[in-house]
Image (tube, rainbow, N blue to C red):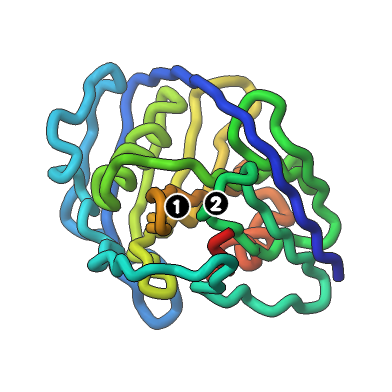
C-alpha cells in the first residue's frame, strides 16, 4: 500500500463538440445500481443550455452549503482507509491558502503524473484505463457547476450517454456520473465514471472531480471504479 502527495499549478482551455447525447437521471437503491428516471434528452451537441438549472438531474446531490469559518488544515471529510491492493493519493493544486486537498484511493498498480497543460493529476492503469483528479476554483453554485460538468462530458463524442446519481459527501453537494462515449475514433466504446463535489472554503468555492475511463468491458475497470469512486477525504490547506 502506498501514500502519494502531489502539488502543482497549471491552467488549460479545452474545446470539443459532438452530434447527439442522452442523459438519464436516477436514484440510489440498496445494491447501488442505477434506476433510470423519466427525464431523457437527445440534442445536437452544438446547442448550449440557456438555463443550466433546468437540466435533468439538476437537483441531485445538491445540499445547503454551510459557510462556517475553517481553521487552517481543517479536515472536513475523513479519507476512506486504505486496504490491500490500494494506494492513497493526496492531491492539491498550488499553495493558495484554502485550496482543498483531496485524498482518494486508487489501485496500487496505477501510476500518476501532473498534466503539463491542465489543472489536473493524470493517472494510468492497465487495460488502457486512465483517470484524472481536478481541483478547480469555480464561481458557479453547485447546481450550475454540476450541470456544466455533465454537459461538457456529453459533448466529448458523437454519441454519449450519462446517468446522474446523488453523491453528497460530508455535507458537500456532490454527484456520481456514469456513462459511455462512442463514435469518436476506431477504438470502440468508452465507459466513464465521475465523482464530483462542490467544496466551499474560506476564500472560494472549488469543483473537485475524480474521473475514470476505459474501453467498454476492460478487465480492470470494475476494480478501479470500486476504489476511485468511493468517498474521498478533504482537507482545507
Which image quadrant: the N terminus?
A: bottom right
The residue that disc 2 covers is 97
Q: Is residue 108 above or below residue 42?
A: below
Q: Secondary structure at mark 1?
A: strand
In the image: residue 63, left or right of residue 203: left
Question: Measured from the top left, where is residue 166 in percent x and y?
Answer: 33, 65
Q: What is the number of the mark on residue 178?
A: 1
The quadrant in which residue 12 appears is: top right
Residue 127 appearing in the image: no
In space, the residues marked 2 and 1 are separated at their CA atoms by 32 Å
Residue 81 appearing in the image: yes
The quadrant in which residue 118 appears is: top right
Q: Mark 1: give few (<14), some (14-19) or many (20+) Cα within 10 Å.
A: many
Question: Earlier along the polypeptide chain: callout 2 or callout 1?
Answer: 2
Question: Measured from the top left, where is residue 221 in percent x and y?
Answer: 66, 55
In the image: residue 54, left or right of residue 80: left
Which image quadrant: the C terminus?
A: bottom right
In the image: residue 73, left or right of residue 6: left
Q: Mark 2: give few (<14), some (14-19) or many (20+) Cα within 10 Å.
A: some
Q: What is the number of the mark on residue 117?
A: none
Residue positioned 29% across, 69% down in the render:
66
Q: Secondary structure at mark 2?
A: loop
Q: Nearer the viewer, residue 174 or 97?
A: 97
Give the tally of numbered discs: 2
Question: Measured from the top left, where is residue 117 in percent x and y?
Answer: 64, 24
The quadrant in which residue 59 appears is: bottom left
Residue positioned 34% across, 62% down in the render:
173
Q: Is residue 49 above or below residue 54?
A: above
Residue positioned 26% across, 67% down in the render:
63
Question: Measured from the top left, where is residue 5 in percent x and y?
Answer: 77, 56
Amino acid at each position: 500500500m502506498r501514500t502519494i502527495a502531489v502539488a502543482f499549478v497549471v491552467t488549460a482551455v479545452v474545446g470539443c463538440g459532438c452530434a447527439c447525447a442522452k442523459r438519464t437521471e436516477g436514484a440510489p437503491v440498496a445494491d447501488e445500481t442505477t434506476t433510470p428516471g423519466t427525464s431523457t434528452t437527445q440534442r445536437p451537441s452544438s446547442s448550449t443550455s440557456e438555463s443550466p438549472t433546468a437540466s435533468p438531474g439538476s437537483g441531485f446531490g445538491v445540499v445547503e452549503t454551510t459557510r462556517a469559518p475553517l481553521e487552517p488544515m481543517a479536515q472536513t471529510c475523513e479519507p476512506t482507509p486504505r486496504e490491500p491492493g490500494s494506494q492513497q493519493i493526496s492531491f492539491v493544486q498550488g499553495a493558495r491558502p484554502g485550496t482543498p486537498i483531496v485524498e482518494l484511493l486508487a489501485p496500487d498498480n496505477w501510476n500518476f503524473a501532473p498534466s503539463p497543460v491542465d489543472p489536473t493529476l493524470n493517472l494510468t492503469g492497465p487495460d488502457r484505463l486512465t483517470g484524472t483528479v481536478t481541483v478547480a476554483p469555480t464561481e458557479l453554485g453547485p447546481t450550475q457547476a454540476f450541470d456544466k460538468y455533465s454537459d461538457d462530458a456529453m459533448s466529448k463524442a458523437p454519441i454519449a450517454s450519462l446517468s446522474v446519481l446523488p453523491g453528497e459527501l460530508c455535507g458537500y453537494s456532490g454527484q456520481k456520473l456514469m456513462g459511455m462515449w462512442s463514435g469518436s475514433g476506431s477504438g470502440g466504446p468508452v465507459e466513464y465514471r465521475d465523482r464530483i463535489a462542490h467544496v466551499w472554503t474560506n476564500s472560494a468555492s472549488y469543483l473537485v472531480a475524480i474521473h475514470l475511463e476505459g474501453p467498454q468491458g476492460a478487465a480492470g475497470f470494475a476494480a478501479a471504479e470500486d476504489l476511485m469512486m468511493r468517498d474521498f477525504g478533504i482537507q482545507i490547506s
